[in-house]
Image: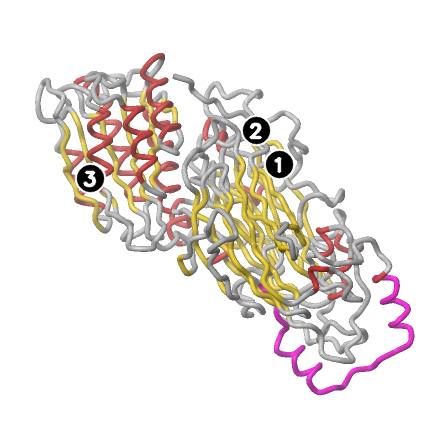
Amino acid sequence: MRVRLLRLRRGIAGGTVAGLCALLLAPAPAAVAETAREPGGGSLVMVLDSSGSMADPVGGGEDPGRTRMAAARDAVGTVVDGLPDGHPTGLRVYGADRTSGCTDTRLVRPVAPLDRAGLKAAVAALTPKGDTPIGLSLRKAAADLPAPSPGAITTRTILLISDGEDTCGTPQPCEVAAELARQGIGLRIDTVGFQVKGKAREQLECVAEAGNGRYYDAPDADALARQLQRAARLSADGYRLRGTRIEGTPTRDGAPALPPGQYLDTIGPGEKRYYAVDMDGTSTVNLGATAVPQPGAAVDTVDRLATTIAWVSGIGDEGGCATRTQIFHQDEGAVPLTSAVSRIPTEKRYSTCDNAGRYWLRVVRESKPGSDAARWPLEIVHGVEKPLPAGTVPAPSQPEYGAGGPEAALPTGDPKDVRGGTGFNDAKELGTGVFRDRLLPSETVWFKVPVGWGQQLRYDVEFADEPTVDGSGSTARSYGGTEVYTPSRHPVGTGTGVFTSRTTYTGERAALKMGTVPVAWSNRYEADPNVAATRTPGSHYVAVTLGAEAAGIARNPEIAVVLRIAVLGDEKAGPEHHARVKAPAKQDESTARADTGGAGGAGWTGTTAVAVGGGALVLLAGVLIALGRARRRAGRDGRDA
């Protein structure tokens, strides 16, 4: 048995940032409850060790006679108090009914809308007695979880809490976990080892790895409560998928048609998925794929998701109009991974990819040996940007960060507590201001910020100075990360040479700076993909991630994170030169403006449509000179962004 130990590569850029203000201090627990998320459609069954060893004292602390079962009762109570109202939750126990026996496993609370009082009462009634049939209990627990609705993709979690290894031998726990992981999409087995060492810990680590989940170590009662909260909350707060169910094919033959919209599929390691896309000869077509592995599942630094717009020649050869590849950049654990491509017609219509006809979106997942072998949900978006009306001369490209560079002045003052979304579909809308959220290890939270023509997004992310667990010391390392996406879901925060998307996190304060260039229609002809994709107004998405190994650093279940957000520049009414400037909108967390392009993004605001449709355009000779500059830039063919 090989136990995979995920470690952050030491080459991660960044470091601790001293002198950040005390705004990062965590809010009171009551404030967290007020901003809890709604249930997300998943389900959870806890499998609690009630074998004879759970009657042993925890040892240490203020109450050395306190038993492990007493500590588990308190921890489970804390967990259920922190779950969202209504989240389907159940409880299975083993070793609670007989002094010996390898069939002693029982479902004491079925998986049903959260009943906090019932779960607490069930745990309070347990008396540790017998053996440790982990393998059988896992198999039974999988059957306890409700099957997803036809076509639905949800997370079903088994959370195993044990203070020792299986004492029955058959079935083997690791083999059962691997068997269950192969049977369905979205099944996750997390394990919490309560005061375990040696073979017992190795077995629980193996179960988590084979079960697409994560192992959490709990050397004492406080750690048990902390780690249980983290695992349960990750189950409840998983990415909220949205879209019409579709099934891609391994080759172009028979690939399903993909009209503009949003779709759901799955993809396994090493797989290709094809989808047929019909394009006209004038519109820009945006295609994006977001893979959603279980948070913290095993990945390698260079595990990747690649998207390609493919075409076929007259003799049947397959070519590519555009390709983009995204990798994890770290091997601590999985997070959502998005790759997006565009077909942008060239200015002189000389490219093969300018032709109207059938193309294919090809999505490829590549994984190293030892990485998560589960099928991942795949959320696909297809959006279309119609060409500019005849006679419209767009403003020149804006490839420089200018006022939105790293030294930009950002808002200060007291932060407002907010709760970020789980993904693109429920991202919390924010405007210019200072905001505070809280993250679990392995978690990514999402926000969206409206950005108009001629404006740019600039923000800082500050990770809190947190008390660390005993023994973590200065050598413990994790990371904090951020990414910004355009309305069409193109990631644009990496590769610029101006900003860095990751920093080392050790429990001390750390910060990141991130931003975009100004939104300009002509950016699509720039060579740098971080510029070329910043070409349409609308909601720009901000994702903030805390690395999985922060679970071994921070003493609190979550850490605080502060965002300082600024939308810079006056908003223009449209993409053309000298367009009138819109009246500034109120910039705060309540800013209400609909996404301009729907799924896949990339439309115009209502004001823009009026300005262009009225024909009141001013065409100046100087515009042609400026536009010529944009056209001469590398990337002139414009086939990708």
User: Quadrant where the N terminus lies?
Assistant: top left
Looking at numbered disc 3 in the image, what kind of residue is underneath it?
Lys
Q: Which residues are magenta?
A: 601-630
* 342 magenta-colored: no
Q: In terms of sequence position, does the residue under pointer 3 or pointer 1 come before the other?
A: 3
Report the front residue among 129 and 288. Answer: 288
Q: Residue at x 87, y 72 (%)?
A: 623
Label 3: which residue?
A: 120
Q: Which mark is residue 510?
A: 1
Q: Which mark is residue 506?
A: 2
* 605 magenta-colored: yes
User: Quadrant where the C terminus lies?
Assistant: bottom right
**At which x and y percent is residue 496?**
74, 45
Q: Is residue 419 visible?
A: no
Disc 2 is placed on an element classified as loop
Looking at numbered disc 2 in the image, what kind of residue is underneath it?
Thr
